[in-house]
Amino acid sequence: MNNKELANLIFPDIDKTIEDYKKIYPKRNLDKKQKVTRFAPSPTGYMHIGGVYQALTNYMFAKNSNGIFYLRNEDTDSAREVENATKLIMETLKEYNITPDEYEYQGEIVGNYGPYVQSERKEIYHTFIKHLIEIGRAYPCFCGKDQLDEMRTRQEERKKRTGYYGAYAKCKKLGIDEQIEKVRNKEPYVIRFRSKGNFENKIPFEDLAKGKLSLSENDIDDVIMKSDNMLPTYHFAHIVDDYLMGTTHVIRGEEWLPSVTKHIEMFEAFGFEPPQYIHTPLLIKKDGDNIRKISKRKDPEASMTYYDEKGYPKLAVIESLMTIINSNYEEWHTKNPDKKYTDFIYSPDKMSSSGALYDLMKLDDISKNIISKMTKEEVYEESYAWACKYSDSLKKLIEKDVDYYKAILNIEREQKNPRKDIAKYSDIESLIWYMYDELFHPENYEWGKITDLDEIRTILNTYMEKYYTEDKEEWFHQVQLLADELGYASNMKDFKKNPEMYKGNVADVATVIRVALTSKCQTPDLYEILKLFGEDRIKERFAKI
Ligand code: GLU
């Protein structure tokens, strides 16, 4: 009896060979510079910001080289219902413009290297496993859970590395006849890779982000096919897929770095050249004095739904990720304010080695900038779409008078130094509520220097009686005249020279008008607000004081 018979016994229906698949999926017709990368999530029904960070890095690297970025659905671990999970992944990528060139979605396969869903590639994996059995690089393992638990306990007690290796790898030593007999007797088994490595040996490994490393050779006989559903494990499936799909660079989280030697050994067992690797740092955040991993359990911002619910422009989220993908992105962006982030050239060696610090304050800053550069039409459209999904109150406010809403948005917009107060669409209502009479029930008025109500009323009344104008060029001059009349310095120079001669200055007077109108001491341009209100509404506001 020989390995071939064992392989046929385990996979009687597999009649294709590796060579057949090499023909079905020929090498891609690309030049050496063009990169092929992939985003290969497991569909869990949850889209982590770290996933988008991975996808974006892969996308940038492929696109910079005019290469291919594809999506592969790694669903071999989840017996769960994956349809919605797959939808969430694809829709998120599309919304963020990280659209893959090749993918499988809702029954449609785009690209010549599909299926792109692992559970649909069982026959391919079986062919490759069959090959490994034939060449003696994979074997059935009959160790049950109890045996493996016992092995682990023993290893832990003796302070040994855990895992199926060396003398612990019992089934590695079974003779071929014994293996065949057990399979025939229908003893349950998994298939393990037969490692030839020696853990004591160090091998050089170059990660394009982390640089040159020296890693211990793999000696673990990992499970490559599970017993219940005969589906492969991640360790094995991705080897086959990355080979057949022509991946040139595997960009994935650094949690996979410890397994890279086993992956390389598997590629080599087939005689395939391994791809190049970029292991990306974890997304971390400041939590008080600590720095820790962004956690699905603790941090709402871990989920992509957070950004949607808060109403961040997609571009803001992307740019905030770009700043942590490459340390030189921000500088580049400052120097090239009119270029798109996709014009940036991503360099793996400019990734942080100690974790990528993700910061919501930073996101807010980036977002404020982006929103400040949008036209009123754009902010209207985006914020209205957001409100339709998440805020009935803003939706109603907008619908009541779209032009008025746009006019409010347009205060200090579409000009050289635009206002930068909106970080996300959910901020808008709390920034503009005072522009709506039905919402104007201020809890307090944020008076500045002048707090005496009689004085305030005098200022407001005199303003309306003698100095009110709708003329943009004139209005501030009128406030100056008002200041003069009531004993306030109408220009700051005079005031600074002799402050004791005045009750205050023109800015204090303008603040009174601002606060009386809005209750806030800080608002966008006062003249624009006055103009939007018009005389009657201004009087109504002043009458409340
Ligand atoms: N399915 C793996 C994960 O979700 C993919 C890792 C890889 O990119 O190879 O972590």
Image (tube, rainbow, N blue to C red):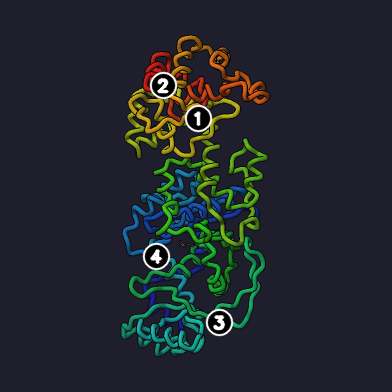
Dot 2: what SS?
helix
Amino acid at circle 3: Lys
- The answer to which quarter of the image holds residue 186 is bottom left
Residue 20: % across, % down = 49, 65
Left or right: 277 in relation to 140: right
Residue 498: % across, % down = 66, 23
Most foreground residue, 373 or 433: 433
Q: Are marks 1 and 2 in contact (CB under 8 Å)?
A: no
Nearer the viewer's eye, disc 2 or disc 4? 2
Q: Quadrant of the C terminus?
A: top left
Q: CA distance from mark 1 to mark 3?
A: 78 Å
Amino acid at circle 2: Asp
According to the image, label 3 marks what residue? 196
Amino acid at circle 4: Thr
Is residue 134 at least partly visible in the picture? no
Q: Are marks 1 and 3 in contact (CB under 8 Å)?
A: no
The dot on residue 11 is none
Most foreground residue, 233 or 339: 339
Dot 4: what SS?
loop
Dot 1: what SS?
loop
